[in-house]
Image (cartoon, rainbow, N blue to C red):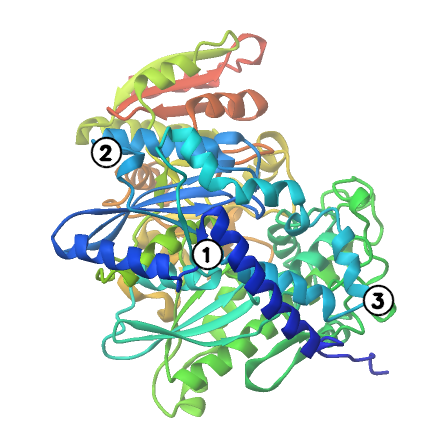
Amino acid sequence: MKSPRRIGPRFPRLGRFCFRATRRVATWAMTLAGFHANDSHFTVRRIAEIRAKLARGETVLLAGLGLPGTHNSGVALVEVTQANGPRLIVNNEEERFSGDKHTTQYPRAALDAMRVTLRAMGRDVADIDAWLTTWDYPDLLGTLARSIVEELPDGLKLLRTKNSVSFDARRLEQMTRTPKLLRKQFGLPARVPLLMMPHHDNHAWFSFAASPFDDCNEPVAIAVLDGTGDQGSISLYVAESGEMQQLYCNNSVFDSLGAFYSVISSTQGGWTWLSSEGRYMGAAAWGDMNRASNPYYARLREVLHFGANGEIQLNRAMGNWYCDPFEAPYKSALIKILGKPLKPDQLWNPDAVLRVEDIQHRPDTQDRLDKAAATQLVFEDAMKHVVDHLLRTTGAHRLVLTGGVALNALGNMRLLQHFDEAWFAQAQGRTKRLHLWIPPTPGDPGVTIGAAWMFAHLIGAPRGAAMTHAFYCGDAPTQTDITAALRTEDIKTQMIGDISTPEGCGAIADLMAFMVAQSGIIALYQGAAETGPRALGHRSILANPCDAGTRERLNERVKYREAIRPLAPMATLEAACEYFDLLEGASDADYNAYNYMVLTAQSKPHARDKIPAVIHADGTGRIQIVRAEDDPLTHAYLKALGRHIGVELSVNTSFNVAGPIAQTPQQAIETLQRSAGLDVVLMVASDGQVTAAWHGGTRDSGRFTAWLAEWSRA
């Protein structure tokens, strides 16, 4: 029996009218508040002034601002020169400093940290030439108005949605006061004018400019697949000869792959939005991933309409999140397939959350895992549908994928597998295959950088260098900062070395490998933190990949998280090639696409026996390749592991417990205190000194001191 179908809103013409009217009024009101559209007279004049400054050979400083009202507020500082283009200095995520994950608050602490960086450069906040926002707020407000009226009267329910930050009046008021808040925070003579950059353009510009793809000879396709942007949730672009053109925007925040996955992963998995998506992707591997046999796949696919020209639309006769995304996101036809959705007050409740470690707790666990697999399969179908049209339209074989949806590492791998030589022979009549690149910050922590990158293009700067690492959040801790954080009674400490010389770096790396070879679980805290959601060796917990018990111990006693969560492998390039099938489509810039844990790889047949801790239920691993030039200590540690356990590959997971990745030395120690199973934290100061910190008192297992003594004698 076919499911009911309704594609598109009830009153699209009324919605478009309200969008235009709201945008016009909002543009006027926000100009009064100090926000300027990117095509306004003020912004055009400012671009001309800064362009002239750049042409004179002067250095330009730009700040990209993620403001209150949307998740992941923060600030990026970018330096621009005519010779080298934009260069990222820092991308400070407020959540790292405040401890409030995915925070929507004014980024006061991130801004203060940026000022410290500026002063170390001999500059200050007053030297910033332009402040850029990550959203075009009149467009966003117009989109919200359109979303309400195009589904009247049901659309009015959106105004009562307590969970939706978009309708939080307090945060909206704080956002509009930002020009004044900046003046007050930094003692500036006048309020700071903010130039508004379109959200999806920001995603696209940074992600393309930081990619290894050169667009001089052939076009590069860019797909922004998101939860929502200013006007829509899917935007497609092509870059050619240094220029970027938007080809398409779906002009809907509900015909959204991000919303589809967030709603179902939350209401079926039992976690809140922004926490549910990665967990549900991990759970899918335990379910039936065969389209022919999965009992939910075919029916669930009818929730999305696969239209002409790569269009994806919500079937509004089944999904109800276009008007009530949290309390009543399913209509009866979808309830018949998936069952009733979990309510917001049930999320994180042990009776609701999807777990595989306690199969007796919920007798329907396997059934729920099959639903996760079906959701992932439908999601992958939709990704392929969009990208298929984009590649046919542009004639490109290189794709930059960005937006929050691009954090689905498994779906990213499926794109590489699907768009192979056979597809290109049929669709483009040539011998090619898809080449794919995803930045380390495809989600909203990256649009702060993107706003500055886009503005750099507008002032005539060259593209800038491709990205090779992600160590840009904050500055390296000083020894004074580390010493201050270690003044606590329940923590023992010892200075153990200095990595500022090759010999010292090699010694610390060998000690790390020695401890991990004894099945120790250690944390490495060094340098600036990673920008983006993945720890990549600067804020990492490391463990033995050859020990089959590592995953259970780490999830249960260190991270306190579900057993469905896989552990990621970090490796040298040689080890990655030995144990995983690195696809040719990710081979640009020496397999740069595997640098950031945004792409899974299929393991080779012998991998599970040798490195069981990092091979997921479906035989994949979300791999990270480490380069000596980007991270000398972590690379040396991996080489040392080769000597101690026979593989240049380690378990790597984020250095956090029930919160954001540890940013400051104080947060690092607090994370150690919360984690009973963590043996030691190695804290590397900006001068290279290394201090070990471990549990004291009754929590001291004696393992670290015993390892240190044994290693010293060896």
Where is the N terminus found, in terms of image quarters? Answer: bottom right
Task: Please tell me which residue is depicted at 42% across the width and 23% down the height of the picture.
Answer: 665
Say which amino acid is labelled 2.
Arg
Residue named by callout 2: 123
Query: Disc 3 or disc 2, which is closer to the eye?
Result: 2
Left or right: where does residue 275 sit relative to residue 510?
A: right
Q: Nearer the viewer, mark 2 or mark 1?
A: 2
Horizontal and vertical percent for residue 347? 76, 44
Q: Is residue 217 left or right of residue 423?
A: left
Query: What's the residue type where badge 3 is placed?
Result: Lys
Label 1: which secondary element: loop
Helix, strand or loop at label 2? It is loop
- Determine the residue positioned at 80% across, 74% down: 317
Instruction: State yes or no: discs 2 and 1 in contact (Cβ < 8 Å).
Output: no
* Picture coordinates of residue 346, whole percent (x, y): 81, 44
The residue singled out by tag 3 in the image is 331
- Where residue 310 appears, as percent x and y from the top left, is 55, 81
Q: CA distance from mark 2 to mark 1?
A: 30 Å
Looking at this view, is 375 or 471 the one in front? 471
| Snapshot quadrant of residue 232 | bottom right
Name the residue rendered at 32%, 61% in the picture. 44
User: Looking at the rendered structure, which numbered label has been put on residue 442?
Assistant: 1
- Can residue 248 be seen at all in this image of the molecule? yes
Percent x, y for residue 187? Answer: 37, 28
**Mark 1 → mark 3, Cα distance in angstroms:** 32 Å
Residue 279 numbered tag: none
Sooner in the amino-acid sequence: mark 2 or mark 1: 2
